Image (tube, grey):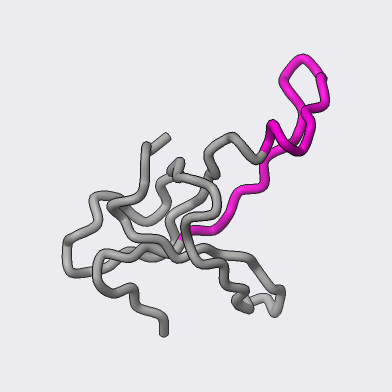
Amino acid sequence: MLRALNGMVLLEQIKEEAKTQSGIILAEKAVKRRPAKGLVRLVDSGGEAKVKIGETVLYPRGLGTEVILRDTDESDKTFEIIDSRELWLVV
């Protein structure tokens, strides 16, 4: 069983398309400047985090620690561990 500590949260990375709604394909450089988007999967139970499990958040790209964990269905998923104080917005 996983448990977050010291105000940390575990985020499942949401891969964003490199294309606008109108169909324009964005350069990789433009995509990297955008904030990252993630789904909160685990929150420190000590009450320091101001987000809840299941919320979608925006945070600075490259700030957290990337980890790969095996899910219950035996597939690998990419997550990021980040300090809850570094989260920007709940979407």
- In the image, which residues are magenta? 11-31
Seen at 62% across and 73% down, the residue is: 68
Q: Specify the quadrant that holds the N terminus.
A: bottom left
Q: Is residue 25 left or right of residue 88?
A: right
Seen at 55% across and 44% down, the residue is: 36
Q: Residue furthest bottom?
A: 1
Above or below, 24 against 18 in this view is above
Residue 24 % position (x, y): 81, 19
Residue 49 sits inside the magenta stretch: no
Above or below, 10 against 39 in this view is below
Please state which of residues 34 and 23 is positioned toward the viewer in this rendering: 34
Q: Residue furthest top?
A: 22
Residue 7 % position (x, y): 26, 64
Q: How many marks?
A: 0
Q: Specify the quadrant that holds the C terminus.
A: top left
Q: Is residue 33 left or right of residue 5?
A: right
Q: Is residue 3 left or right of residue 24?
A: left
Residue 8 % position (x, y): 33, 65
| Location of residue 71 (image quadrant) | bottom right
Q: Is residue 6 left or right of residue 79?
A: left
| Location of residue 23 (image quadrant) | top right
Residue 12 sits inside the magenta stretch: yes
Seen at 37% across and 62% down, the residue is: 9
Seen at 41% across and 61% down, the residue is: 82
Q: Residue furthest left?
A: 47
Residue 33 % position (x, y): 60, 36
Magenta segment's dominant SS is loop
